[in-house]
Amino acid sequence: MIFLNYLKRSLFIYGLCGIMLAIFLFTFILSTKIYTIEEGALSSLRNSLTTMRVLKKENDMLKKRIEEVRSLLPSNYDDRRYDYQLLKTIDDIKKGFPGFILTVEDFSTGDFIMSIPFRINGELQSYTSFVKGLNQIENRIIPSVRINTIRIDVTEDKLTNVHIGGEVRIPVIDKGGDI
């Protein structure tokens, strides 16, 4: 009987120790899994923060480059209509080639560029004035002038005819401010 009493008490203590061991193991396994999940979350957060810093740096660099491009534009670039600026450039081209006939075609717009094609025809009186006129055309920044063709013909009468074909182009900025 004494043995039975001892066995009852021991069994209770062994059962209590087994339950405590099971709780300890469950808690240990659970905390290990939570730790690995937290490590993965922290690693993902670190990667996201690094990516965010890189994107912010690139965004700042792009903003700086856009401002550099905008600094090259004339100060009143957004104030005037694009067609007005193109026609003003056509007038400047005409002044560079006095006595020549200048013809223009319709405006065309595409991929953030507005342009107007032109042709200049005339008799070459002075080679120096012709070169000065070409220099004036080529030194324009905005609107820019693209010369596609230059043809010089000498007739039987020893007259020199010049034919120039090209287009005046301007970048079109949408109202959101993007180029």
Image: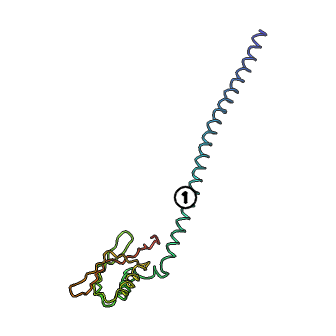
- For this view, does 75 lie left or right of residue 3? left
Q: 103 above or below 52?
A: below
Identified by mark 1, the residue type is: Leu
Can residue 91 be seen from the camera position used here? no
The quarter of the picture where the N terminus appears is top right
- For this view, does 85 lie left or right of residue 8? left
The quarter of the picture where the C terminus appears is bottom left
Q: Residue furthest right?
A: 2
Indicate the position of residue 22 as horizontal and vertical percent values: 66, 27
What SS does tag 1 mark? helix
Q: Of 107 and 121, which appears nearest the observer?
A: 121
Indicate the position of residue 14 as horizontal and vertical percent values: 72, 20
Q: How is the image coloured?
A: rainbow
Determine which quarter of the picture holds residue 39. Answer: top right
Q: 165 above or below 16?
A: below
Can residue 59 be seen from the camera position used here? yes
Indicate the position of residue 85 as horizontal and vertical percent values: 40, 82
Residue depicted at x 72% and y 24%: 17
Instruction: Provide the residue designation for mark 1.
Output: 55
Residue depicted at x 55% and y 68%: 64
Indicate the position of residue 60 as horizontal and vertical percent values: 56, 65
Residue depicted at x 27% and y 85%: 160
Residue depicted at x 38% and y 72%: 113
Q: 30 above or below 143?
A: above
Q: Of 25 and 72, which appears nearest the observer?
A: 72
Determine which quarter of the picture holds residue 109. Answer: bottom left
- For this view, does 25 lie left or right of residue 110? right
User: For mark 1, does the 10 Å Cα neighbourhood hold few (<14), some (14 to 19), or many (20 or more) residues?
Assistant: few
